[in-house]
Amino acid sequence: MVRYSILRLLIFFGVLLALWLVGIRNNPVLLLGLSAIISAALSYALLRGMRDEMTAKLVERHEAKLQAKQEGRLAASEDELAEDAEAERPNGSDTVR
């Protein structure tokens, strides 16, 4: 994720420098606005593969957390059922008379 962010910043500053060299120096708002728009479009096109990899990793991590949470709930519900069954047994029912 850090690599992706650094590449986005490099693209932004590269576009900023290119626009500055072209001559859009006098209006800093226009220079920054155009740089942001152009660099966003370039990043979307050039960094698609890296973005897809990051998305897949985030989805895997999220699914693993959901799976662990679900397993924890199943274990907890099994424990609760066992405790309920023990509580329902009358005292002394374990011994044979």
Image (tube, rainbow, N blue to C red):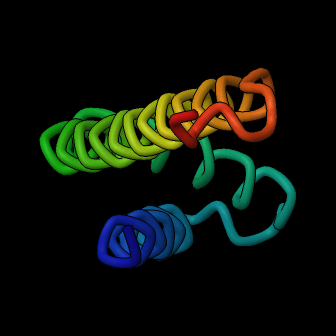
Tell me the residue at 86%/57% (across/down).
29
Tell me the residue at 36%/34% (across/down).
63
Q: Please tell me in which quadrant of the rendered image residue 87 appears.
A: top right
Q: Is residue 8 above or below residue 92?
A: below
Q: Quadrant of the C terminus?
A: top right
Tell me the residue at 26%/48% (across/down).
57
30, 51: nearer the viewer: 51
Q: State the image coordinates of residue 35 (x, y, percent, origin top left).
A: 58, 54
Extreme front residue here? 97
- Residue 38 visible in the current orientation: no
Q: Please tell me in which quadrant of the rendered image residue 48 appears.
A: top left
Q: State the image coordinates of residue 28 (x, y, percent, origin top left).
A: 83, 66
Q: State the image coordinates of residue 32 (x, y, percent, origin top left).
A: 72, 60
11, 22: nearer the viewer: 11
Q: Please tell me in which quadrant of the rendered image residue 89 appears.
A: top right
30, 4: nearer the viewer: 4
18, 72: nearer the viewer: 72
Q: Is residue 29 above or below residue 9?
A: above
Q: How many numbered marks are there?
A: 0
